[in-house]
Image: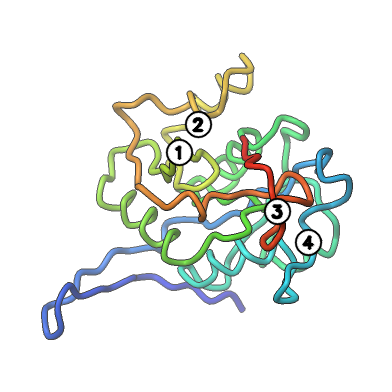
Amino acid sequence: MLVMLSRFCSTSTPGAPSSCVDLSRICPVVLVGGRSRRFGRDKLLEPLGDGRLLVSVPITALRAVFGSRVAVVGACNRQVAALADELIPDPYPGQGPGGGILAALEYAQSPVFVLSGDLANINADVVRAVAVGFLERPNVWASLAWSDRLEPCIGVYAPSAISSLRTVLETGAPLRSAIPGEHLRTISVDSIYAHNVNRPGDLPGQRDSDHRGV
């Protein structure tokens, strides 16, 4: 049985009234359709120092906020699919994260919170902040993390973004250009949480080159 966390409440000071936001209409999704070419093997199944697999980090972060209803989208190893609560079909294979985001939106017909599967340091606090940012601005097309740049694979997309995402796929434009500024909210995060793994040297604890990209 799937567990759904319908509301998140916080208080600014002890004894103060709580402020609550409804999370139930957001579908949490991990993008797992990458081919790991630069890594040389399936990076999502790479064990980390604490024994977890790389892909379990974003799954765990989403579950901590949304409960046990985390989906994955994209062609992936069965072991990866088994870690999630649901598998979303991907009608846009090989079209990058934009295809996965579009597939999730079309499937859910509701806002989706997306994380790429190779985010080694993402946590629930970042997820919660970005989700609340979206719910505070109900008319935006997306609420995305901003580190030292826009992070299109850490954020919430509304169904109103579907047309723009389709245009990106059709034209080959960068995913970062999908959401016009007037329809976008950005939430500042430390760049450590946006670090994604492209090569073995990018794994936590390794001396890495600063390779990140979408």
Q: Quick one: label 3 or label 4, which is nearer the N terminus?
A: 4
Residue annotated with mark 2: 162
Q: Quick one: label 4 or label 2, which is nearer the N terminus?
A: 4
Q: In the figure, is residue 15 to the left or right of 153? A: left
Give neighbour class at mark 3: few <14, some 14-19, many 20+ (Cα, 10 Å): few
Q: Position of residue 92 (x, y in %)?
A: 72, 33
Residue annotated with mark 3: 207
**Amino acid on which disc 3 is placed:** Arg
User: At numbered mark 2, what does the secondary structure look like: helix, strand or loop?
Assistant: helix
Alpha carbon distance from label 1 to label 2: 5 Å
Q: Position of residue 95 (x, y in %)?
A: 71, 30
User: At numbered mark 3, what does the secondary structure look like: helix, strand or loop?
Assistant: loop
Q: Residue at x 48, y 23 (%)?
A: 177
**Closer to viewer: mark 3 or mark 4:** 3
Residue annotated with mark 1: 159
Residue annotated with mark 4: 80
**Amino acid on which disc 1 is placed:** Pro
Picture quadrant where residue 48 is located: bottom right
Number of marks in picture: 4
Q: Residue furthest left?
A: 16
CB within 8 Å, label 4 to label 2 = no
Picture quadrant where residue 80 is located: bottom right
**Closer to viewer: mark 1 or mark 4:** 4
Give neighbour class at mark 1: few <14, some 14-19, many 20+ (Cα, 10 Å): some
- Pick the residue in front: 39 or 72: 39
Q: Residue furthest bottom?
A: 15
